[in-house]
Amino acid sequence: MTRFLTTLFLSTFLYTGAAMAVEESKYTVETEAEHYEIRKYDATLVAEAKIEAGFEDAGSRAFRILADYIFGNNKAKKKLAMTAPVTQQPPSEKIAMTAPVSQVSTPGGFWVQFTMPAGFTLENIPEPNDPRVRLRMIPARRMAVYRYSGTWSESRYTEKLAEFRKELEKNGLKTTGEPIFARFNPPFIPWFLRRNEIWLELAKE
């Protein structure tokens, strides 16, 4: 029942956001290759939570924590606008300091992150009441981004990540840090219409 309610909440929240032109992370496209783009992302403020769960459960479990924060569970009792995508990334020592916006894996789970709306900084963003929510500014960075449709399964993600890495290697591009999984749609959107992305930070030349 808890999982059902989480999914229903996630669906309703993201559907409402999609209907209102959800704000996305700011970036410019530097290069368009056949299967991926090179993007320059601006410095980004995120709210994130570390979840000790598997790839397919981390996003839904973290969503309730982070959504609770932007719905007003903060010191200022202020509601914040939803943005896209919801991302997850595995934490590591490096990521704990400079993690990008997304779902990223770690031996202990994933970092799941919401981008904060434009205009907020670490100085003026409402402070979370929940100690599991961490606010962090991610520096500007260059990312290789691979877009695909389909399910959010770990097997499909792993397959697409392998294809992406092979393409980058063929083109002589080196990356650093953990891959980031970015989701842009609610669960009720048909799998073949979903927008999913994998982000890999490019190593400095």
Image (cartoon, helix red, strand yellow):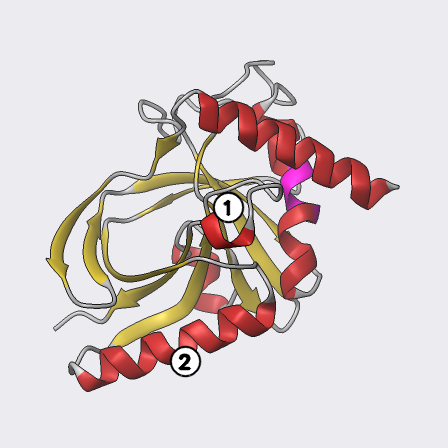
Rendering coords of residue 164 (x, y %): 33, 74
Rendering coords of residue 141 (x, y %): 24, 55
Q: On screen, 181 above or below 117?
A: below
Q: Amino acid at mark 1?
A: Gln
Q: Secondary structure at mark 2?
A: helix
**Total numbered circles:** 2
The stretch of residues the image draws in magenta is 61-65
Mark 2 neighbour density, 10 Å: few (under 14) some (14–19) many (20 or more): few
Write the residue at 50% across / 21% down.
80
Q: Quadrant of the N terminus?
A: top right
The numbered dot on residue 54 is none
First of labels 1, 2 by sequence position:
1
Direction from residue 56 to residue 191 in the image, left or right: left
Write the residue at 43% across / 61% down.
180
Give the residue pinned by disc 1: 113
Rendering coords of residue 17 (x, y %): 49, 26
Q: Is residue 142 magenta?
A: no
Q: On screen, 189 above or below 125?
A: below
Q: On screen, 137 above or below 157?
A: above
Nearer the observer: mark 1 or 2; the answer is 2
Q: Amino acid at mark 2?
A: Ala
Q: Residue furthest right?
A: 1
Direction from residue 41 to residue 57 in the image, left or right: right
Rendering coords of residue 185 (x, y %): 50, 42
Give the residue pinned by disc 2: 162
